Amino acid sequence: MGQCGITSSKTVLVFLNLIFWAAAGILCYAGAYVFITYDDYDHFFEDVYTLIPAVVIIAAGALLFIIGLIGCCATVRESHCGLMTFVIILLVVFMTEVAVVVLGYIYRAKVEDDVNSSIHEVYNEYNGTNSNAQSRAIDYLQRQLQCCGIRNYSDWQYTRWFDASKNNSVPISCCNTKVGGLCTGSLTRPEELYQEGCEALVVKKLKEIMMYIIWTALIFAVIQILGMLSACVVLCRRRSDPAYQLLITGGTYA
């Protein structure tokens, strides 16, 4: 019965280590995704706090790759030292991912306030030229999220760009591509413009990214618990009954 428990635990460990390698790639991808998204919306943040969970999760991904390597070697060779190292590093990564979940929830709550405090300033810096970083950011944002203005297209009337242009229109990036005809951004034809404001959509997008990070960390934290439990079973059984079959070679006693 003990032999069966050990063999089963070792088989699960080998399988989990393969999952850890895949998880390492997924975690690094998740972190990189946050970095890329941040680059698109960085003008709407006063802080870079949203990058902290991304940095942590990339570090966790790198550690998971090392864990997978150590775990496979330790399981096949039945190394007590290797398995102990595997469990300890796995515990560190587990605690790191718990920290990611906590930070994710904390920073997710701060997103709305941060966007609210910076988006008005960015819109007021808009001048409609490609040389202006704020203009490029806003035009990209409005096309990408299919929105116009802060709360709606009428917000453009209170910007310096609107006062300077004196043509009673909003930027062309506000034009709804799903509506036929030639759109000039004129406020006399509001049906041609995106109706939804950008502020709520930016907040929603960033909160979705945070939840993506949180759920990724939670799922792999559960897998790591299984890995630690399996390693502990092998370690405990080996200590109490050192004479068991090797997983790979079979029939050779430790």
Image (cartoon, rainbow, N blue to C red):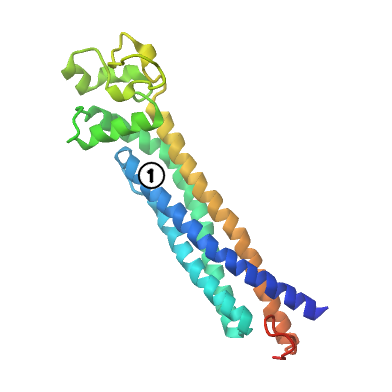
Residue found at x 65% / y 71%: 13
Q: Picture coordinates of residue 162 (x, y %)? A: 22, 19
The answer, for residue 84, to whether it is visible in the render is no
- Pick the residue in front: 168 or 246: 246
Q: Position of residue 7 (x, y in %)?
A: 73, 77
Q: Is residue 232 above or below residue 173?
A: below
Q: Can residue 85 be seen from the camera position used here?
A: yes
Side (left or right) of 254 relative to 199: right
Residue 144 at what x, y percent from top left? 38, 32
With 34 as the anchor, is 226 left or right in this view? right
In which quarter of the view is residue 40 placed? top left
In front: 106, or 253?
253
Q: Quadrant of residue 138?
A: top left
Which quarter of the figure is the C terminus placed in?
bottom right
Please state which amino acid type lies under the numbered disc 1.
Thr
Residue furthest to the right in view is 1
Q: Residue at x 16, y 19 (%)?
A: 164
Q: Which residue is mark 1?
A: 37
Q: Please, which residue is most extreme toward the top here?
A: 188
Residue farthest along the front direction in this orientation:
181
Residue 220 % position (x, y): 58, 58
For the N terminus, the quadrant is bottom right
136 lies above or below 177? below
